[in-house]
Image (cartoon, grey):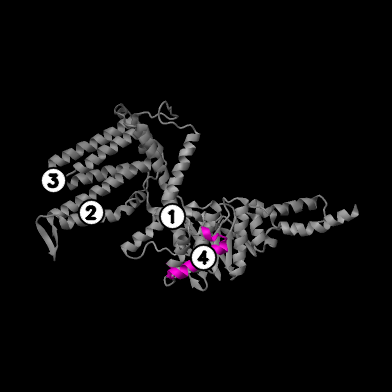
Amino acid sequence: MIKLENVSYTYMSGGPFEKKALDNISLEIRPGEFIGIIGHTGSGKSTLIQLLNGLIKPDGGKVIIDGQDLSDKNTDIRAVRFKVGLVMQYPEYQLFEETVLKDICFGPLNMGLSQKEAEDRARFAANMTGLADELLDKSPFDLSGGQKRRAAIAGILAMEPKILILDEPTAGLDPAGRDEILFKIRDMHKRLNLTVLLVSHSMEDVAKLADRILVLNSGRIEMFDTPDMIFRNSTRLREIGLNVPQITRVADRLREAGVDIPEGIYTTGDAYRALLPLLKEADGNK
Amino acid sequence: MLKDITLGQYFPGNSFIHRLDPRTKILIIIAYVVLVFMVQNFIGYAALALFLALCVGVSGISPKYLIRGLKPILVFIVFTGLFNLFLTPGETVWSFGILKITREGIRFAAFMVLRLIFLILGTSLLTLTTSPIALTDGLERLLAPFKKIHLPSHEIAMMMTIALRFIPTLLDETDKIMKAQSARGASIDSGSIFARAKAMVPILIPLFVSAFRRADELATAMECRCYRGGEGRTRLYKLKYGAVDALGWVYMAVLAAAIIFINIYFGSF
């Protein structure tokens, strides 16, 4: 379980460039939840997730993971990092080993596992992220963009974290690569029963995947609720530089135009189910 | 940790020092460095300190910030001090086992440490008050006469501009990669020296890869804007000497005269 109590974080504190990145954040995330995190650029998303595995320490407040306070001197931060897997933005830039397999093994070996165990985990993780076996002996620098991204995610997954945090895992990928990564993330969430935190700029993605959505605005929590409740506030979302999914906008316009379509359309699936009976009806009337 | 590095950072301002022509500043700094090595006694260092304090006061840069720039090389300063303290032969004043401190050692250590500190403070004052562009512009102009002996002054200046420009970028990048590898359980700041050196590999390789990638992208971007070296290149802002520069030189001349006088009058001790 993840718990934040009145957490604040300031960059370059005391200097002329002081910037408050997070301001008095309190929240709780239950095991097994899929959380989407959205917010304007500079709203504190990346800072927030770096606090969760102790890469940075809060200036005030407490970060508690499974009952362990990360600011406590007795907490083994490395053990927490194995539990909270963080995939940073553009994670392919952290690849460094000779082969993909060795690179994925880096995390498990740091945990003190044997070579054999590490490789088993690496193969499993590669499989989970959809990396073909024959790629594992290649140099990571010879892979395509999407494959590199997957290798980097596998490197985190091989540590078998209970919580997986991904910072814009689909940034800069082509549509096919994007869909595949998101599909794999959903798959991992279900099959491995992971708690997933997904930072994204795509309203469509979080609407499709998340149980709850955390909306950040200038370092504060603006909303933290189910997609249904969040996307009802389209005016407020637009004010803070966000939006509702495109399909929701289409549904809204249709409703304005007099089509009898219910509220709460957030995915193309929703729209499909709402529009199909209407179209059939129209067809029958002809 | 990486945030402490003030090297190459520029504080915009409009003080007397900011308004000096970069060429004047570079030449004054060279003269200053020569003076730092010419000084033979502590009164001379007091004179230097006074000069530097005046410059800092005029520049409007917080002394705290300037001193913070010493932090990354603190280890270096301490080691230099200790080596000179213990390893200079001469009249022993204190000894413990094989360790002994000599009178000459104390004097030497103090001189070395003071020299290093004055060098760093002086040169950081230059980079803090001069934008990297102005700095390399000044350097290019100063080196221009050497073109006659085929010194590629424009290219040198361009390389420096690019190097300075990428210091913050690469620091940022290093920070990110270190975080990414820490997230995978790499322990960067613990363990024996060998373990630490080995732990640098996962940071250095991605850093080099990205530096080469950036260099490649930059070259393409420059070529897209028809960059073809310094031949026939005109500039938007031309450097001009003004009254402030003359004043700067007068100030420097007074210091040099003072140092030489102190050296002759008090001798070395």
Identify the amino acid type marked 1.
Asp
Residue at left 48%, top 35%? Answer: B223
**Closest to the observer: A274 or B49?**
A274
Residue A129: in magenta span: yes
Pinpoint the chain carrying mark 1.
B
Tell me, yes or no, whether dots 4 and 3 are on the same chain.
no
Magenta-drawn segment? A110-134
Q: Earlier in the sequence, mark 3 or mark 2?
A: 2
Quick one: SS at disc 2? Answer: helix
Pointer 4 local density, CA inside 10 Å: few below 14, some 14–19, many at least 20: many
Pinpoint the chain carrying mark 3.
B
Check disc 4 and report the residue beneath it.
A123
Pointer 1 local density, CA inside 10 Å: few below 14, some 14–19, many at least 20: some
Tell me, yes or no, whether dots 1 and 2 are on the same chain.
yes
**Closest to the observer: B55 or B241?**
B241
Check disc 3 and report the residue beneath it.
B268
